[in-house]
Amino acid sequence: MASLKQIASDLGVSTATVSNALSGKGRVSEELAEKIRDHASRLGYRPSSAARALKTGQSGILGLVMPDLTNPLFPRIAQNLSIAAEARGLGILIADSRGDAARQDEALAQLVGRGVDGIIIVPRLGTAPPQMDVPMVVINTASDPRNTVAADHRGGGRQLGAHLGELGHRNVVLLGGNRASEVQQDRMRGMTEGLGPEAHTCAVWGEEGMSALPGLVAEGATCVMATSDLLALGAHSHLSRAGLSVPGDVSLTGFDDLPLATAMHPELTTIAQDVEAIADQALDVLTLRIAGRPDPAPVSAIPMRLVLRQSTWPPRRRDLSVTLSSHHSETDPTGAK
Amino acid sequence: MASLKQIASDLGVSTATVSNALSGKGRVSEELAEKIRDHASRLGYRPSSAARALKTGQSGILGLVMPDLTNPLFPRIAQNLSIAAEARGLGILIADSRGDAARQDEALAQLVGRGVDGIIIVPRLGTAPPQMDVPMVVINTASDPRNTVAADHRGGGRQLGAHLGELGHRNVVLLGGNRASEVQQDRMRGMTEGLGPEAHTCAVWGEEGMSALPGLVAEGATCVMATSDLLALGAHSHLSRAGLSVPGDVSLTGFDDLPLATAMHPELTTIAQDVEAIADQALDVLTLRIAGRPDPAPVSAIPMRLVLRQSTWPPRRRDLSVTLSSHHSETDPTGAK
DNA sequence: AATGTTTGATTTAACGATTAACCATCGTGA
DNA sequence: TCACGATGGTTAATCGTTAAATCAAACATT
């Protein structure tokens, strides 16, 4: 491995000069600097990050703590964080907290032990992450708005709700996966707001809630809004098993725009997080904190993007033909099998 | 931050002694060692990984290069690798090659630049990873068996095929996503073997292949075997859109046992990778290579586990009631809607 | 001509942990 | 009593990089 010392002795100069030439910091004649850069690249010189970290106290590595990598949304966040980090010359060390709060603390300790400069954390459900003396940024949980970056879940729900409201739905079932999740509650709150005051909504949860769906439709519900795409897929199964077709008999929406949303039939109307923007924001906030700059303006929630597909349609009327403002260009699926 | 020097001067001993006491390497009286450990933990001492890395030349960090984190299987591998690494006191630095071969090389260079001790790589499709002077292990692509750890895709296909063969399927459609993927080809090869010589199979690919499914069923196919769960979901959509029910009219299988497999209805019969074992193996191989030990015996492919659910059933007969060896305890779904 | 100032490079000392080499001290066997 | 081997510890060098302090010319200023 080529080192500064190597280059220096090869060229008969001091290591300091080499360091200066390569970093452009001190005072080196352009002529010599050129010669040094040349030789360095010929030798394939790569500065030792360990040595640099030791000297400067900065490792150039960020820690990422995730509750559960099997949640299909997180990898997308991780991927975008990794891209954003690379663009800033930083590396990302992952740690999996496996949902467990204790393990989450342990993971944090591990990371700081490895000398990360800062930490990005996606905390498990409501668990507020511990306050540490390391710069941190929290994703997707509204704890402290000054170090949190999050999608506008509520606004997203509102968009979806408004869409269905416009279609004419007034009797809507909200399907959640986990009562304890603040994010899911936010999403539901937004949906209700978007639907407007004249709509009647009711929330159901989990496997039990899914089974109740056909009954609720029989009682007049015309739409099911799930707080995740996976849940929507489950709902779709329960509904079609009961002989109800989507969107003919009942409209269905998801959340997050996972790959499966387009693999279903009908393709799922859902709402997408701008994961790229989230990752960017998170890294901006974090790098500022690492630089010790006073906190910038609190970050506002990042808007979500409505993705209209084929699973939403105006409610079937007892009386027949329906006129609508044509959000879709498809043929009327009401009569479809 | 507490350092060795700090502890040493607090206790009036030399840093060497503190180092020895903490690592248990040199000769220190048990009495003094105890006192040192005590003080160290009181101060919350954490050795500086940078300093240690500089001195020993080992960073304790592994690099992980993945082609595309949005593929739902990879995160599970990543998660298990992260767990396995943690158990061995190692960290994992991620890098996303985004499918691009050029970026893959760049990611590798980045990682070695950061001083990783070894690299785990899941190469993009057929791209053979470049030979570098860093210890490496390759996952899921059969390049060189001596540094490759992979699930037994072919054996998995064989298991699935055998299952369907036993049920009586003789006319089977194989559905793939990408012709270029060796893994998918392996899977298909296995399926064909498992079904046995008397079965007739035909392979179709991608979106185009999915559209052809209903026609093929009309021509006598009784079963669709997809090379991934996501593909199976798509197939299910196309089939049910055409009025064909699963498993009544046609059986369906997936691959990988993703979360969506249980969210579908019927739940998908599929085959699961033992990601935990894969991760373990990969790390074992890699740590051996890092230690410079001569290569251990080549690793054999890791067996997959058949997951029987409700999407497979004996083929419908022109003549009626069917007797079967009851792989399922469900009621006959042939008559179901 | 004596005194600054700029320019280009060198010394030197650190960062924190590890480790080979060295040095006391004490007990033991010859 | 003397040399010897444990035992318990210290010194000092080192890993590769950085940065402050220093130094020696060359050049400009009065």
Image (spheres, coloured by chain):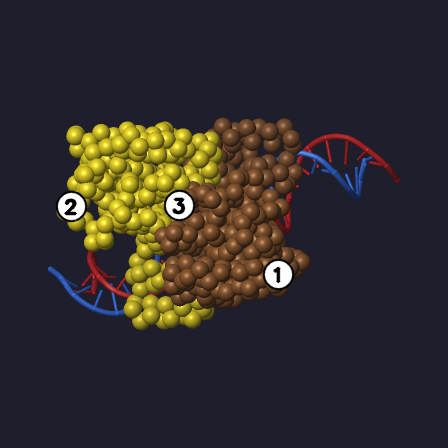
Chain colours: A yellow, B brown, C red, D blue
- Position of residue A322 relative to residue C3, above or below, is above
Chain name for mark 3: A
Chain name for mark 1: B
Residue position marked by numbered label 1 in the rendering: B196
Alpha carbon distance from label 1 to label 2: 55 Å
The earlier-in-sequence mark between 3 and 2 is 3
Q: Amino acid at mark 1?
A: Gly
- Callouts 1 and 2 on one subunit: no
- Callouts 3 and 2 on one subunit: yes
Residue position marked by numbered label 2 in the rendering: A324
Q: Amino acid at mark 2?
A: Leu
Q: Between tags 1 and 3, which lies in front?
A: 1
Front residue of D2 and A87 = A87
Residue at coordinates 31% horizontally, 64% vertically from top-left? A28
Residue at coordinates 39% horizontally, 48% vertically from top-left? A75
Front residue of B319 and B31 = B319
What x and y, as percent, mark residue A208? 40, 30
Q: Disc 3 vs disc 2: Cβ atoms closer than 8 Å?
A: no
| Circle 3: element type | loop
What x and y, as percent, mark residue A113? 46, 40
Residue position marked by numbered label 3 in the rendering: A72
Crowd tier of the residue under label 2, counting other residues whose Cα lies within 10 Å: few below 14, some 14–19, many 20 or above: few
Q: Is there any visible trace of residue A169 in the rendered image?
A: yes
Q: Amino acid at mark 3?
A: Pro
Alpha carbon distance from label 3 to label 2: 35 Å
Classify residue B87 as left or right of residue A57: right
| Circle 1: element type | loop
Residue at coordinates 44% horizontally, 53% vertically from top-left? B232
Front residue of B337 and A88 = B337
What x and y, as percent, mark residue A51? 44, 52
Crowd tier of the residue under label 1, counting other residues whose Cα lies within 10 Å: few below 14, some 14–19, many 20 or above: some
